Image: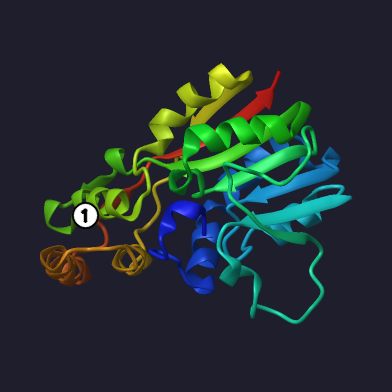
Amino acid sequence: MPENSKNYGLPSHRQLIEQSDWLAPARARLLRRVQIAHCRSVLDLGCGWQAVTPELARRSSGTVVVAADADRRVFFGRTSEPRPFQTVCCDAARLPFRSGSFDLVFCQFALLWFQADEAVGEIRRVLGPGGTLVALEPDYGGLIEFPDEIATARLWQAALWRAGADPRIGRRLPGMLAPHGFEVRVDLLDRLVPPSSLRFDLLRGLPLTENEAAELDAIAAADSKCDNSRRVVHLPIFLVTATAR
């Protein structure tokens, strides 16, 4: 988990796998676009429990694949099997890599937890000429929910701010990247999928007030009684490919 998390919101391995599965089609499109098969050095920054790192190692030419996170806990206890990548515990604002070390830096639901302006500068530094940042980042300020009794947008934004994250990182990210010499392309996640109760589990992992926790319990109860055909929950995901000029 990235450095701003203050131990809040460290999702379980199962939760991160489910989140990664949900994003798999969009992630695959972005990785094909940047020709990951030709990338020899890849950094998975803010890797968490490494739900995506094996995929990056498998799809790249994989001479060097590094999983980096500020939380040491994510690197221990998952498996005794050899991993096809290196692991490094580090701060995204002070990456311990030489300039131009990577062809690809990948972030998924990670930049919202960083001091993003500093992290973007470090990402640009460690990318070689023509190297690419691929980022899938949310914008909870644009969360669409229907009917109103299942709406959680206000709780997400309050809890994420309280935990030290930026719930609107999606809309801010393109403007952050351009001044650092990136050529930026942005797409938005365009699929509506049935909402998962996982969203309530993830929200409960954040620092809610007592009143907010009670409100969330009431929302979850209303959601369980809601007709599936009526429910709409859509979190805008900014799908960013940024090439270092």
Image color mode: rainbow
Q: Nearer the viewer, residue 75 or 219?
A: 75
126 w.r.t. 150: above or below: above
Structural crowding at the residue carrying mark 1, measured as other residues with C-alpha within 10 Å and reported as few (<14), some (14–19) or many (≥20): some
Q: Position of residue 188 (x, y in %)?
A: 46, 34
Task: Determine whether, in the image, residue 191 is placed left or right of residue 216.
Answer: right
User: Dot 1 lies on which element?
Assistant: helix
- At horizontal 52% and vertical 27% (from top left) the residue drawn is 186
Question: Which quadrant of the figure has residue 75?
Answer: bottom right
Residue at 72 percent of width and 61 percent of height: 87
Residue beneath the point at 57% across and 41% down: 93
Vertical relation: 36 (above or below) 241: below
Q: Specify whether 142 is left or right of 175.
A: left
- Identity, as a three-letter code, of the amino acid under mark 1: Leu
Residue occupying image coordinates x 51% and y 49%: 110
The total number of labels drawn is: 1
Frontmost residue, 118 versus 151: 118
Where's residue 229, x and y in %? 26, 58
Is residue 160 positioned above or below 202 on the image? above
| Residue 66, image x, y percentages | 75, 54
Residue 33 as seen in the image, left or right of residue 5: right
- Give the vertical position of 165 relative to 245 (above or below): below
Q: Looking at the picture, how far across and down is residue 85, in whole percent?
A: 79, 60
Q: Which residue is mark 1?
A: 155
Front one among 72 and 218: 72
Look at the image and tell me in which quarter the C terminus lies. Answer: top right
Q: Is residue 220 left or right of residue 2?
A: left
Residue 94, image quadrant:
top right
